[in-house]
Image: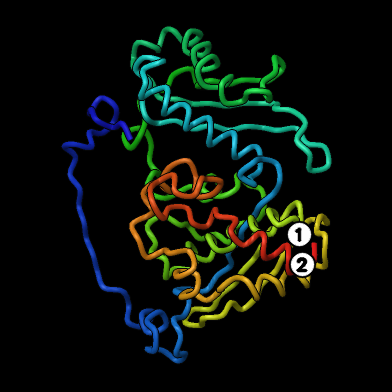
Amino acid sequence: IGYDDAAKGIDGRSCAVMVTLDQQSPDIAIGVNEGAGLHKEQGAGDQGLMFGYACRETPGYMPLPIDLSHRLVARQAEVRREGLIPNLRPDAKSQVTIEYDNHTPLRVDTVVISTQHGPEWNDRTSDLYNAVVEHIIRPVLGEWYNDDITIHVNPTGRFEMGGPQGDCGLTGRKIIVDTYGGRGRHGGGAFSGKDPSKVDRSAAYMARYIAKNVVAAGLADVCEIQLSYAIGVAEPTSINIDCEGTSKIEDSRIIELIREHFMLTPKGIIESLDLLNPIYKTTAYHGHFGRTPGEGGPGTFTWELTDKADALRRDAGL
């Protein structure tokens, strides 16, 4: 990541790492372990709602604001590693405001980038601003860049101290930046730190997989999938779909096709997306969705595949 010096807040080579493990409650385990509970199949690891979303705003079927935001911080990391802007540090975040007209992006209105830096930039804020615009914002925005964009770079004026040293509240994950940037709904469950028996993670991945394939198949231009589960029960307690009026066939028919083409039990999700593998490291940065299958190594981001699109289109009669 780049935290390799105590001056940056923490040195990953010398910091202490404490590991404390405990056994899962047997009352939960009987619902998750196949054949152990009231139901023979592997049940969900908890109750809850999970959502998946896809749209046609970007090639990756993601909303444009979160897509640009992820690309901006990815570019910041690239610029930092290549030394294009000297002594940038790892802590960074971005936010992009888009003007829409009836679900169609018109223009980028505002870009915010906060990037940690070395002390030499404290009295050169305008130089850092210009460097960030030149090396990060312009290359990422491309045709979306215009001279009327409001740009904020480190709007407090200084961002020397960052990372774990800089603020509290860094133990959790920001669930909206991990998903769709506020577009669509969220069931409230975080992903990171959970194995795929927890439907907070695995069912959210499946919901994204379904939504992306529905849109890629041309069944709708926008698709939000909602799944819900009960602890210890294998089949989802509900499947709901919202295509925001863009569906090409009846929503009820899309739900039928979903049931026909996707395995929605915890065991089925784990098997179809191949989730029992060490594939999660690269989900810790730049979001869990809108990524390229395999970009983090073999078997990563399987939920971003569109391998069901042709069959869905065929069976929908499109």
Residue drawn at (40%, 79%), measured in percent from left and top?
32
Residue 174 in the image, given as x and y percentages of width and height: 49, 47
Residue 214 occupies quadrant: bottom right
Residue drawn at (50%, 17%), measured in percent from left and top?
135
Residue 228 in the image, given as x and y percentages of width and height: 59, 72
Q: Residues within 10 Å of mark 1 (few under 14, many from 20)?
A: many
* Disc sitting over residue 219 in the figure: 1
**Is residue 318 shown left or right of residue 191?**
right
Q: Are marks 2 and 1 in contact (CB under 8 Å)?
A: yes
Residue 76 in the image, given as x and y percentages of width and height: 45, 26
Q: Residues within 10 Å of mark 2 (few under 14, many from 20)?
A: some
**Is residue 137 shown left or right of residue 202?**
right
State which quarter of the image contains the C terminus: bottom right
Mark 1: which amino acid?
Leu
Residue drawn at (66%, 26%), measured in percent from left and top?
110
* Disc sitting over residue 168 in the figure: none
- Circle 2: element type: helix
**Is residue 290 shown left or right of residue 211?**
left
Mark 2: which amino acid?
Ala
State which quarter of the image contains the N terminus: top left
Residue 169 in the image, given as x and y percentages of width and height: 40, 44
Query: What's the CA distance linking mark 2 and mark 1?
Result: 8 Å
Q: Is residue 238 above or below residue 132?
A: below
- Circle 1: element type: loop
Residue at image mark 2: 316
